[in-house]
Image (cartoon, rainbow, N blue to C red):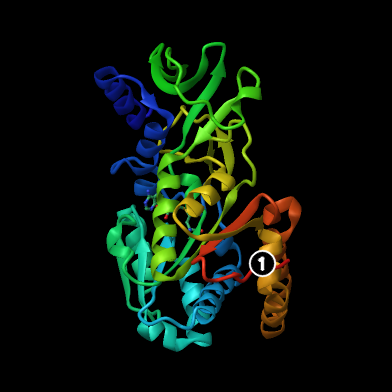
Amino acid sequence: MNALAKRIAELIAADGPLSVAQYMTICMHDPQAGSYAARHTIGRDFITSPEISQTFGELLGLWVVQCWHDQGRPDAPRLCELGPGRGTLMWDALRAINAAAPEFLSDAEVVLVEASPKLRAEQREKLKTSAADIAWAERFDDSLTDRPLFLLANEFFDCLPARQFVKTERGWCERLVIVEDDKLAFALAPVPFAAEPTGGADAPDGAVYEVAPAALALAEEIAQAVASKGGAALIVDYGYATREFGETLQAIANGQPVDVLEEPGDSDLSAHVDFAALAAAAKKGGARVRGPVSQCNFLADLGIGPRAERLMIANPLQGRDIATAVDRLVNPALMGVLFKALAWGPKSIENLPGFNY
Ligand code: SAH
C-alpha cells in the first residue's frame, strides 16, 4: 500500500466503507497525495485535445465569439472555463478571441474554475501575458451566475466523482471500497438501493450503473444561469450518447491502464460521461440543448480543416506535425468519435455553432 492507500484504509477502519465517488474524490484531490494536487498528471498519465493541437482552443474561443454575436453581443459577459488544466485551451482561446473580437475581451470577466492549487499556479504562469484580466475560483458557485455566462469545459466532467451500482438478485447494490487482507478491495452494499435506474429492469445481473450526481447538479446549475442571463455552455469530453450499463471507471498511469485500487493518487481516475444524463439535467435547468455530436463532426463544422491548412501554410516546416495532431483529434479511430460535444444556450436561441453537420 502507498501512503495514501494507508490513510484511506485508516479512514475506512474509523468511518466505514467509502462509495466509489468518495474514493475518486480523495484520489484526485487529497491535498498531499491527490493526482491533481500533487502529481504532474496531464501530459504524463494522459494527454488532452488542447495539448495536442492549438486549433482546438482557437476554435472553442471562436465558438464563444459566435455565440456572443448570435445573442446580440450582451454587455459584461463572463467567460468561464471549468478545469483548465495547464491553461493551454484558455491561452489559445484568448488569442483567437482577441483577434476576432477584442471588444468581447475588454468588457468580459474571465474566470478559471480550478480545484488544484498546483494547477492554478501553472495556469497563472501560462496566462500571465494574455490579453485578458483573469480571476480564479476553486469551484463553480452562485457568484458566477449573475452575468451572461459563456462556459467551456474540456475533459472536466469525466473527473467528477461517479457512484456505481451493480445489479444483483437483491436489486441494485452500491459498490463500496473496503479493506480486505490488508488491501483496498471492492464490495457490494448488503442493502439494495431503492431506486431502479431508467432502463435497468432489463439489464442482466452483474450490470453496472454509473451516475455522477455532482456532474448532473452542476450541469443543471449552469443551465439555469445560461437560461436566465444568456450565454452558452460547451462540454467536450469522452463518453456515451445514450445510457449504457457498463463499468467505465478507469485508472491511467503514464498512458497505461492500471488497477483502480492499487496505488491511489499515482494515476488518473475518470469515468465516461453519460451525455444523455447531462443533457437531461441541462434541460431541467431550462436551457435549449444541442448534441451530443462526435468531436470530429463538431470540429469539422467549426472549420478545423481550413484552420489547419492556414497553419500549415504559415509554418511549412511543421506541416506534417500539424496534420498529425489534427488527425488525432478528428480521426474516428482516435479521438474523433469517443469524444463528443454537448452545448446549451437560452431557449430564445435556435441554434448554436458546431451542431450543423
Ligand atoms: N481541461 C484541461 C484539463 C483536463 S484535466 C485540458 O483539456 O487539458 C481536469 C481538470 O479539472 C484539472 O485541471 C483538474 O484539476 C480540474 N478539476 C478536477 N476536478 C475538479 C473540481 N471538482 N473542481 C474544479 N476543478 C477540478
Visible in this render: residue 171? yes
Q: What is the quadrant of the C terminus in the image?
A: bottom right
Q: How many numbered discs sit on the rendered protein?
A: 1
Q: What is the quadrant of the N terminus in the image?
A: top left
Where residue 258 appears, as percent x and y from the top left, is 55, 33
Residue at 35% of width from left, 37% of height from top? 26
Q: Nearer the viewer, residue 153 or 129?
A: 153
Rendered view: 208 above or below 68: above
* Residue furthest out toward the left: 14
Q: Secondary structure at mark 1?
A: helix
Q: Nearer the viewer, residue 146 or 42?
A: 146
Visible in this render: residue 321? no
Where residue 294 appears, as percent x and y from the top left, is 68, 56
Q: Which residue is mark 1?
A: 299
Residue 314, picture quadrant: bottom right
Q: Is residue 134 left or right of residue 255?
A: left
Crowding at dot 1, Cα within 10 Å, few <14 / some 14-19 / many 20+, comes out as: many
Where residue 49 appears, as percent x and y from the top left, is 58, 60
Q: Is residue 233 left or right of residue 204?
A: left
Residue at 47% of width from left, 84% of height from top? 98
Q: Amino acid at mark 1?
A: Leu
Does the numbered disc 1 mark a residue whose Cβ is under 8 Å from ligand 1? no
Residue 295, picture quadrant: bottom right
Residue 104, picture quadrant: bottom left
Rendered view: 250 above or below 292: above
Q: Nearer the viewer, residue 215 or 119?
A: 215
Where residue 195 appears, as percent x and y from the top left, is 47, 26
